[in-house]
Image (cartoon, rainbow, N blue to C red):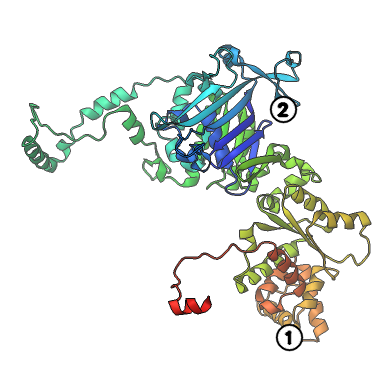
Amino acid sequence: MKVVRLTISNFRGIKSAELLFDGHTLMVGSNNVGKSTLCEALDLVLGPDRLNRFPPVDEFDFYNAEYLAPAAEEGAERVPTPLRIEAVLIEPGAEIGAKCGGNIEFWHVAEQRLLGPGEADAANLPHAVPCLRIETIGQYNLEEDEFEARTYFSHSPDAPPGELTKVPKPIKRLFGFLYLRALRTGSRALSLERGSLLDIILRTKGVRTSLWEKTIERLRGLDIEADAAEIAPVLRSVERRLARYIALESPGNATKLHVSELTREHLRKTMTFFLALSADQGHVPFPHAGTGTINTLVLALLSFIADLKPDTVIFAMEEPEIAVPPHTQRRIAQYLLTKTTQAFVTSHSPFVIEKFEPSKTLLLARNAGVVTARKVSDATGLKDNDYKRFSRSGLSECMLGRAAIVVEGVTELHAMPVVARRMEESDPNLQPLDIAGVAFFDADGESNMPKFGKFFKTLGLRTFAFYDLDYKKKRKPEQTQALADNFDINVEHAYKGFEDLVVAEVPVDRLWSFLSGLKANDENGNVAIPDARPSDDAVKAIVKEALGGNKGAGWSARLFEECELHELPATVTNFLASVFALFPPPPPIDDGDEAPPEPAAAAAAS
């Protein structure tokens, strides 16, 4: 069973959304775009336990906290505005199909839509598959002064007119939906609270434990005072004072200490999973383990659940990369892709992003509360092997931002951010590029730049290019046009290479100082640097050789670090200034600390 469509209205930060899914899905996007809200929506409509809360929703589960519609006229009663979340589940399976047969509809696979009345002839495999539409409606109950939420079958032919059939909790459990808000919630996941991973495992295995009865019996018989005789006089004193106001008729002591409230629910909350981490260490509460250990062991529990229900596990998981090393991130992603029926994942990690095909990766956008998504594969011009090759080396960072500065080599990738930072430090009116969501990307050659520019531009990013002069006149007209078409700012600088630009525009005194530092620290390697300063042309030639032979070492960036702002190459600073101009800083904060003007001064100003 899989979710193929999710429709949302009036839920949290989403005014409306309709998203289509094709199996495993990675959801990426900037902060506050709605990734977590989508996972919460799936939990609300598919999860068996979310609606057990009281209240199941609250004011801020409604878009802009507007759970009452504006009054039609002054003095009129305001009508509740519901929130709605609907999921379409295809191929529900034999057990669910047998129990929900009257609610089954059909989903056209190729056209990604429901079949309507009069389309019975199209309801044949493989073009159409059985589906269930499940919707959760939440609203404010004026009479009871409380919030309610219930889940229904959207298609309820047996219900009275105008009503829908409720989805029983046992049916929801058959959906096999699990939501882990973040792996850092492992301390609760390993408790015995309702809905925790341990509790899910016990219920999935059908375990009816006598743990609670036996534990309560033992705790009731535990005499704490026997181990702390000094407490007894205090308790007896409390009893005597209580007896002045309350008739204490117990034949023995009227007060007693217990380590728990001796109820199932309280024990569920207080029982703690202990773990011995090393041979020399005793068992400690699980939350005291390292965060990475917690997250990795939570993954072990998730795999246990998936093995128990291999055909009906749908996971929604936020940021599996939190506090775990790259190899574990890859394992988590690989596990979700191979061991679950369907996985919904949010992530900012390139190690997770690279595991999902572009066709399975949705880039989310939100505009005035309307959330939309597009497959990364729809950004034409980039092959899957290029996507995977570059996903770790800046592609993921650019995709999650607002703009990309595409350069043709590693030298520019290292050096130009140094120039940007120096400009930011010298001018408080510039918004730092990383805060603005502008990232640098190495296309590994000018010939690759147009396809990456097209990729980023199709995803809705601003695009900027900076590359060398075509001094050999080898660039074809169509390549020149592709560069112009795919970049908002398209700069072909006037030099054969970046090293030529550096030695031409950085003062010779600074170049010689840089060389002298290399020689003094015995870092020049095979670069011959004389003791006495040679002619300016010789200094430039040596610097060009040094920079060209040490691209990977970032020597151009190191040179820029030593420069004063006015010594940095004007070609680079002018290019970056044009980028900064497109991302002005937000208005200054008025903290109200300034004293109001004197009356006379105010009158003069007016």
Q: Residues within 10 Å of mark 1 (few under 14, many from 20)?
A: few
Residue 222, position as x, y percentages in the image: 21, 31
Q: Is residue 374 left or right of residue 85?
A: right
Residue at screen point 62% across, 47% down: 349
The amino acid type found where label 1 is placed reads Asp
Instruction: Identify the element where label 2 is drawn.
Output: loop
Residue at screen point 77% across, 46% down: 386
Q: Is residue 598 left or right of residue 368?
A: left
Residue at screen point 71% across, 20% down: 115
Compared with 317, 216 (above or below) is above
Residue 213 is tagged as none
Q: Residue furthest front?
A: 74
Residue 317, position as x, y percentages in the image: 56, 37
Dot 2 corresponds to which residue?
A: 112
Res 138 visible: yes
User: Which quarter of the rendered picture does the N terminus lie within?
Assistant: top right
Picture quarter containing residue 340? Answer: top right
Instruction: Identify the element where label 1 is drawn.
Output: loop
Q: Nearer the viewer, residue 455 or 73?
A: 73
Give the foreground label among 2 and 1. 2
Compared with 331, 31 (above or below) is below
Q: Is residue 26 left or right of residue 601?
A: right
Compared with 525, 334 (above or below) is above
Residue 531 is tagged as 1
The amino acid type found where label 2 is placed reads Gln
Residue 557, position as x, y percentages in the image: 69, 69
Q: Nearer the viewer, residue 165 or 346?
A: 165
Q: Nearer the viewer, residue 138 or 333?
A: 138
Q: Residues within 10 Å of mark 2 (few under 14, many from 20)?
A: some
Compared with 486, 41 (above or below) is above
Res 304 visible: no
